[in-house]
Image (tube, grey):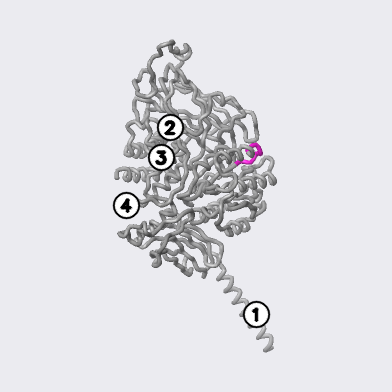
Amino acid sequence: MKTTCVRIGMMTLMLVIVSLGVANAQLMKVKGRVTDETKRPLPGCSVFVKGALNGTTTDMGGLYSIEVQKGDTLVFSFIGYEKSELKIVKPEINVKLEPSKVMLEEMVIVGYGAQKLSEVPASATHSNVAQMLVGAQSGIRIRGTGRSNPNTEEYKPVTENRFFSALEDPLSTFSIDVDAASYSNMRRFVNQGQMPPAESIRTEELINYFTYNYAKPTGNDPVKITTEVSACPWNKQHRLVRIGLKAKEVAGDELPASNLVFLIDVSGSMWGPTRLELVKSSLKLLVNNLREKDRVAIVVYAGSAGEVLSSTSGNDKQKIREALDKLTAGGSTAGGAGIQLAYSIAKKNFMTGGNNRIILCTDGDFNVGVSSPEGLEGLIERERKSGVFLTVLGYGMGNYKDNKMQVLAEKGNGNHAYIDNLQEANKVLVNEFGGTLFTVAKDVKLQVEFNPAKVQSYRLVGYESRLLNKEDFNDDTKDAGEMGAGHMVTAFYEVIPVGVKSQYGSVDALKYQKGKTVQPTGNASGELLTVKLRYKRPDGDTSKKLEVPVVDKGTGEGSSDFRFAAAVAMYGQLLRDSDFKGDATYKKVTELAKTALDNDEQGYRREFVRMVQAVESMAEK
């Protein structure tokens, strides 16, 4: 009897111990804010569980959220500040990091260069120095020091579109662009207190960052054209024509199965919380949305390329997350080899009728093997016919190679986004999941024919890197842009009406020949222009043409969407110091945008207004 009681007691004790262990192992979500010694938020601070693989980074407001076990220790780490370790005892932990007590005496090494502390002014406070170290990681100019930290970012020079005569050049042809990378990249500069380089601004990508209430396709065509004409806000004598495209929407459960290859740059230039660590956090958001029928493989490249996860069911999310968590940065950048391997694996696991896509995450700093924009263009063009699409996600600050990212996006049947924080990753990979990953129309081209009886001259706002020859419109072998499920595209033409005196687009009368005359049909027609669109099905080789005439009714101030998009266009031209900005000012941008804040469920339009106000303040100094 005594032995039985002892056994029962031991079993009870073991059950208690097991129960305590289970309780201690219970998962919980911890959130909070990380600030500096002046109580300002610290974006990009690394937050991870000590001795474990899971971690995250703070957003632009210094906020973080992470799933942990009660009793774990959270480690908060940020360059220039003392590391902080706190045991988890409650679901909300706010942390104030103190400046590092031991600064490196010789120099601070960053992912791509070095900043000597001898360059730091003696008057700088400890907090200022810490900010300079963060700035060095981003390659920003430190205000007030008169010095620049290493910045090797590369952008493709842009020659701005000019006015053309509707009589001499009645056709304007270009490939559509759904990318919005320039907007988030621009926002990164502004949030760092720096004016973005003019060559980094692609006005059409600023405009296309936002959503508009365009009519959805209703027939068999996956794209619908919407048009609107109103006064040009930066030149009241001119007219502004908006062309909007809307791709058909596909419900999440109706989207085809995905064969995805995550192609991740793990070279030395990707070290840091805004690079590889942000890549991991971004892709985990995507992994959360995968279905059992979706599959993911992971390829990485540094000095060479390799597969770290073979094609795995989207149902096995933990396995995919663990493979991401193990990634570390170091070495040179054999991007060409990585791209080739990723295409090989994507083709090996090809899903007929599915979405076959590579998601490339990089700062674009390719320096081993195929690395030049021309070499990458040739590589991508050879692979384009495989039926595998390419999504390019740009990361990093100070070493970002935007010019190479543009080549990959334009030539690889895909799209391009710049991820400056976790919210942007959520926008691109979760909120716009269908548009980012599922193509409904490819090789989408626009050609606009202007009526010289109504239009003296015209100018396409933006799309400089997407221009096509007029013959390319009917050439089905000519590559053009892709539209994903639910995608929207907006293009503006600034039009000078016949009879309006203007310094733009006019020439003297010809001496040796008579000028062209307007065709009778042009005089009789009330049409301002005609919009023509060509597209192919994702698996097709033959295009279909859509055509819509546009009449300028000459009334009204334009819809809310028109006014907001026009404000963004005006802002882009100011940032570029455009020759055609007219009487635009940042104040006018703000005033116009404020009249169009009704379609702003996610708050992006209000964020834009605040950003313009910040830029206006910087521009005045």
Image-based side of 191 in relation to 4, left or right: left
Dot 2 amino acid type? Glu
Helix, strand or loop status at disc 4:
loop
Badge 1 density bin: few <14, some 14–19, many ≥20, Cα 10 Å: few
Q: Which mark is residue 360?
A: none
Q: Looking at this view, is 298 or 236 the one in front?
A: 298
Mark sitting earlier along the chain (2/1): 1
* Image location of residue 352, percent across then percent down: 69, 41
CB atoms of marks 2 and 1 within 8 Å: no
Q: Residue, x 53% and y 28% (percent of image)?
A: 468
Residue 92: x and y, percent? 45, 64
N-terminal of the two: label 3 or label 4? 4
* Circle 4 residues within 10 Å: few <14, some 14–19, many ≥20: few
Q: What stretch is highlighted in magenta?
A: 384-389
**Position above or below: 354 against 99:** above
Image mark for residue 11 = 1
Residue 198 bears which disc, if any? 3
Of 93 and 191, which appears nearest the observer?
Answer: 191
- The alpha-carbon separation of the residues under discs 2 and 1 comes to 80 Å
Q: Does label 3 or label 1 sit earlier along the sequence? A: 1
Q: Where is residue 176? Give x, y as percent.
A: 52, 33
Can residue 514 be seen in the rendering of this structure? yes
Residue 160, label in figure:
2
Secondary structure under badge 3?
helix
